[in-house]
Every structure is written in C-alpha cells, then in structure tokens.
Image (spheres, rainbow, N blue to C red):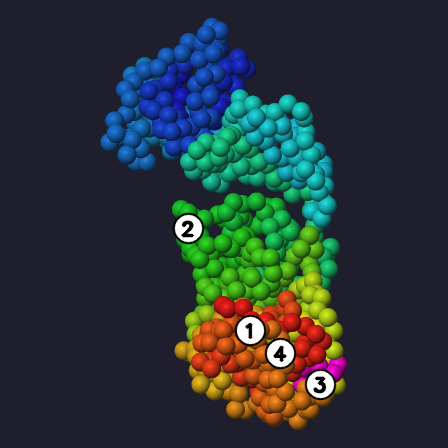
Amino acid sequence: MKIVPDTSVVIDGRITSMIKDGEYTGSTIIIPEAVVAELESQANQGREIGFSGLNELQNLSKMATEGTIELKYVGERPSLDQVKLASGGEIDALIRRVAIEHDATFITSDVVQSEVAKAKGISVIYLKPQIGESTPLIIDGFFDEHTIAVHLKERVPPMAKRGTMRQNSIEQLRDTPMTEYELRMIAQEVLERAKRDPDGFIEIERQGIAVVQIGSIRISIARRPFSDGMEITAVRPITDVELEDYAMADLIRDRLTTTRRGMLIAGPPGSGKSTLAQSIATFLSDKGCIVKTMEAPRDLQVPDNITQYTALEGSMEKTAEVLLLVRPDFVIFDELRKNEDFRVFADMRLAGVGMVGVIHAMQVQDAVQRFFGRIEAGVFPQIISTIIYVEDGEITRVFDLDFSIKVPEGMHSELHIRPVTTVRDALSGRIAFEVFKYDGETIVMPAIGPAIEEKTPINIPEPIPEAATPAPEHILAEEGAEEESSWETTKYEIQRELSRFTDGPVEVFMKSDTKAVAYIEDKDVPASIGRGGKNIASIVNKLRIGIDIRPRSELPPLEEEIPEAEMGEEMPETEELKIRIEKKHLTLVALRYREAIVDVFAGKEYLFTATVNEKGEIDLARSSSIAQELIRRYNEKETIRLRPV
C-alpha cells in the first residue's frame, strides 16, 4: 500500500502511531519534498511544530531502517515564489500532485486539503481529531495534587512549585538534570496532543516560543534563540473556588446585579485574579446571564456553556466586533495589557455590555492610573464602577468609583474646577483617593493614606515642647491636635522640592496628613506653580500631598519671645558662620559663601536650602518656623553648618 501524508499528519504524529499498531506495517510511505521544505522552514523560524514534524520524519526513517516500512522522498522542492504563496495553497497542491503521480492514498488531518483532494478524485483518508484521549502525557508525571507549576530546562534538574497560593516552595524533583532529548520528546507529545484534543490549543507560536493550553494546564515551550536553552514550563490551577467562598462576596454580587456592571480585578502576578474572574463568570452564568470571555491565552477554567474567545487574527478589537454582534450580557476580559485592550474594554462597556477586567497592579492606585491614562477622564467611572483588589488568593479591598465636577481635595481653591473621579472604600464609605487630569498629567491624590497602604513609620524624635514649630491658628487642622512624627519629614520634603523655585526660605505648615500650606517669596510664587500649574502638580504627584502655595506677605505674624536669645545678640558658631538675631529677623552670616546656593544643616539633619546674598548673609523672618528651629537647635548645642549645593 502506498501512502502520501501531508504536513498536518506528519506534525500530528499519528502516522507512526498507526504503523506501531500494525495498521500500515509493510506499506510504502512517500514523503513529498514539499513537506520536508515546509517543516524545515518552520523549524528555521523557531516554530515548535517544525521541530515536531522533523522528529516524526526521524521516527519514520528509523522504522524504515528496521524494515517495518519502506520510506521514499519524492517530488520537487518548492520555489521561493511557491513558498510565498503557501497560504494560498501552492505547497498543498505540490503534495497532492505527488499522490496523483504515484497513485497513492492521501492522508491528511486538514479538512480543506481533504475536500480539495476528493474533488480531484484522489483516494483520501481524513484523520479527524481524536476525542476522549486519556493517555497521560509525559509531563503529567511531574505533577501531583500539590503541584502548582513545573519548570524543566536542559542541563538543570527538574523543579516544581508546590503548596498553596499563600504558602508554596520550590522543590527539586530529581538529582539528574534534564536533557535536550527529553525536552524535545515532551514538547512533541504536547504539540501532538494540542492538535488532537478538542480542549487543546496552540495559543502562541513565534520564533523560539510556543504556548499551548491543554485542558487546565498552560505549557510554555521555549528554545534558542528566544531562550539560552530549551525550557518547558507548565502551570495549572490547584483550587476550584466559588464566589461564595470569598470575603465580601455579597458586595460583589450586589454590584454585578445592579447598574454597576463595570468591574476591574487588580492585584500582583500570581495573586489569584484569574481564579476570582472565573468564579464571577460561573456565578453570572448560573444566574442566567450570557457570558463570554476574551483571553490570550485561553486559560480560564469555566463551564462549557461559557464560550472562550481569543484575539481574532491577532486583534482583540476584531474579537470585540464579533462579540457585539453576539450580544452577551457579560464579558470577562482576562489580562488587560496593551493600549488596544483598554480601548476595547472601554468601547464595549460604553456599548452597554457588562465587563469584568483583570489587570496586574501592585496597588489599587497603580491600576487606576494605568487605565485612567488611556481613556477620557470624564467617562472613566462609567467604564469602571468597582475595583476589587486581590492578594494571596483573597479579596482584601473593594472600591466604588464616582464622578463629580469640582476642585480636587488638597489643591488650591483658585484652580479651575475639573472632572474628578473619587475612589471610595466600599465598606467604610471613606474616600481613598481622587484621580484627575492636571495640565495633561494624571494625578492620584490620596485622602486617607493609612487606609490604602500600610507603610513602615519613620522614627523621628518627638519635638521638644518649647521649640515646637509655631503656626498661626487658622492654619492648624484641628485645635489641640498633635502633629504626627512623619509630618516633620513631609515638611522637609516639601521645603526641598519648593527650594528649586525660590531663593528665599520655604515655610511649611501641616494642616493634616494630606494637606499643607507653604509660604515662599512673593515674586517666586508664579515659578513654583508653573505654567498651567505644571510644577506644583509634579510635586503633588511625587509627594502625594496637597500643597497650597501662598506668598510670604500673607504669613500671619507670630508674637512669641525667644527667652534664650537676646535681641541683636550675635552667636558665633564657627569661623565660617555666625547667627545674628534682631527684632524681626534672624540672619546667618557666611562671608565665605557670598552669592552661593547652600544647604543648611543642624548636626547631620538637613533643614532647608537658601541663596547667600552679595553681603554674605541669609535673612530669615524671626517668626518663621525655620528661624525658630535654628534657635532651638543652637540652644541644644547642635552645630549649625552650611554646605554648597
């Protein structure tokens, strides 16, 4: 019996399986040169199916050497023009011609090739995808019930990640390293199964990399030149979680079943975002909703009644066009990464489709900023109405988004009102932070810092009562409230940032954890604000605190005597620096640094930056907080010194 297999069957690997089963023992296997050329081209491009097909030809050659079959290579090698027209069927035509010339049975697993061959009068055997494959894969032997992922690389012993999402560890599975031959056999078997299994997909195949999904296992196969050696990584979910198993599940149910149908699931990689997304998909499906998914790759484990779509012709935008015709109630968009993904998500949500998106982010603010920068600010809350933050497999926070036109909290009241998105904690109802555009830049302004992110406190000595920074009463946030130790650090940071725009002193008064008032020289106020508020917006976004910049002429006078220092007293510090106190001024005399910009230190601690005038002096208002601080430090015997910038 003469048999001519096409490229799909050689890659599929079932020819050798059928020969081993005795079905084609003693047959003459005729391999067209066009098949060899196509496999060689694919292998040269780093495509895994090319290597899989070449391995199959090597197996056939070994069978021919053993006398099991007779193997021939015939036909002509395709020309460059024919290779360029391969997608149009030129290579397939050369393969069919070999079957006609040798009066052989043509075997293919390509349905189009099969139908064309029948139309040509060729004897055809069409190998349909096998259903119900139960033979374990080689890679299955590396898994047990506690294994999350398996990492196999040539010249390295196989490793496995075992445990739970919260607690897991890397374990070595054996002492001997993996060989390239073992990895090639595993890769070929995986690709053959993906071709035959209805639940198998080759999601990505590019030079040096192939990503395959078989059931619940996602397998990545990498080889040179993409990686420095052949590597196979297999990942699978180990838990099947229902929405009811999560904390705050009632909040999520309420929002999914009302008008707040734009949801974002955020969290760091491996935190359980996709697991929550598939739980939500199953919940919605059980409630009678038509649910679809958009994934690349398709690795969500959802019931069969939920259709999983990938990028159509490499574009999620084309997938969205199809979905809008299908008219689902909800779409689960797994892993928003590219600009196109965010735009598609927004378009579908504004079209009335309920959307649940998954995004990588270390903080909720990061997720908002990534999304906010890609769409119109005014429609953001219409697209995303709820944000769920997931960490270690659990829902830790749920936030609701609202929209208003106002002056953002913490910004100068004279600024123009603008669209502001308010992010509010769903449980407490407190505002977490606000998001808005300022001179084209996205600003995320926290309102309750400790409720969003717990930070390690900075240990700063408690202020000495008699030298505490005095402030006008209308500047204090609450009468009798104590300043937190971190305020001093924040004040110094604000002083340092604003000193870039003024030659004079910068005096800062903290009103609350997120608001401050800064007084600088009258002439320097415009420069510190910047054109369109660009400079102050940059500082606000960096320090995450609202800053109200005011001219020094508005600074209320302080009526406080300095008992330790006599008026007009000159206090020598070093040969290079003297401190002189007068009725309304405190002057640092540093003749050596005339017209230089200097940092002023008390001991090792930075206080402020200033410019020494042509007389070699730095003048400060005696009532200012900086002057009071200098006097306190001097009375405590700390060394006051200058350092040129």
At 73% across and 70% down in the image, what residue appears? 461
Q: Secondary structure at mark 3?
A: loop
User: Mark 2 or 4, which is nearer the eye?
Assistant: 4
Between discs 2 and 1, the one toward the N terminus: 2
Q: Earlier in the sequence, mark 3 or mark 4?
A: 3
Q: Nearer the viewer, residue 370 or 124?
A: 370
- Residue 595 placement, left or right of 308: left
Q: Which residue, given by chain and number where applicable, does mark 2 sit on?
A: 315
Closest to the camera, between mark 3 and mark 4, is: 4
Q: Which residue is mark 3?
A: 564
> Magenta span covers which residues?
465-470
Mark 2–mark 3 Cα distance, whole angstroms, equals 75 Å
Residue 239 visible at all: yes
Of callouts 2 and 4, the N-terminal one:
2
| Dot placed on the residue nearer the N-terminal end, 2 or 3 | 2
Q: SS of the residue at dot 2?
A: loop
Alpha carbons under labels 2 and 4: distance apart: 74 Å
Reading the image, the residue beneath label 1 is: 576
**Rendered location of residue 628, percent (x, y):** 65, 83
> Residue under circle 4?
572
